Image (tube, helix red, strand yellow):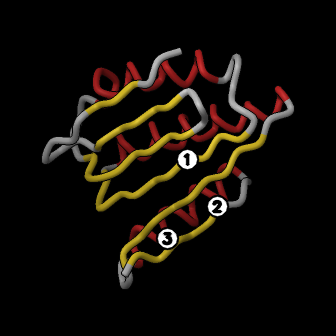
Amino acid sequence: MEELRIAPTKNTPEIILNPEGIICIKGRSIHENVTDFFGPTEDWVTEYIEVPAEVTVVHMTLEYFNSASAKVFIHLLQKITYVSLKHKKFIFNWYYEDGDEDILERGEYFSYVLDVPFNFVKLN
């Protein structure tokens, strides 16, 4: 598997998918055509979970995202939890700016919906 990198724009996040078990999504995600944008990411994760690294670490550092993006993020994170079926581990790190209660609450909601622990990391 090869690393997949998608450069950020003013409306789309930076995405780095490394087959050694590092997944980073950072920035803003406010576009409506999420199916086309996240298609390559979905395909990469589907292939990755077949032969995942020992530990998969997901870093989510989002400034803002719309509801269409939220659905995609929940789906991607759910898919990543399937590495446990291969007896591998996953860690979800959710970063938020100090005082950004909205992003923190969205992360807490994702953790609740997925029924998996998140590490919440406050940025200064």
Report the residue at 64% width, 61% height from top.
Answer: 118
Reading the image, the residue beneath label 2 is: 118
- Say if 39 sits above or below 25 in the image: above
114 relative position to 18: left or right: right
**Residue 62 position within the rendered picture, expressed as x and y whole percent measured from the top left:** 36, 57
Q: Are marks 2 and 1 in contact (CB under 8 Å)?
A: no
Q: Residue sitting at 42 percent across and 70 percent down?
A: 96
Q: Amino acid at mark 3?
A: Glu
Position of the C terminus by quadrant: bottom left
Q: Earlier in the sequence, mark 1 or mark 3?
A: 1
Which mark, residue 40?
Answer: none
Q: Tell me where residue 45 sits by quadrant.
A: top right
Secondary element at image label 3: helix
Name the residue: 57% across, 55% down.
110
Label 3 CA crowd tier, 10 Å (few <14, some 14–19, many 20+): few
In whole angstroms, how far apart are the C-alphas of marks 1 and 3? 18 Å
Under circle 1, the secondary element is strand
Q: Quadrant of residue 33?
A: top left
Left/right placement of residue 87 relative to residue 100 reads: right
Amino acid type, mark 1: Val
The reply, left or right, for residue 109 in relation to residue 89 is: left
x and y, in percent, of residue 37 in the image: 29, 26
Nearest the viewer among 76 and 20 is 20
Going by the numbered disc 2, the residue's amino acid type is Phe
Name the residue at 62% across, 65% down.
Answer: 119
Q: CA distance from mark 3 to mark 2?
A: 12 Å
Taking 79 as reference, is 16 left or right?
Answer: left
Which numbered mark, 2 or 1, is in the foreground of this view?
1
Q: Which residue is mark 1?
A: 58
* Residue linked to disc 3: 105
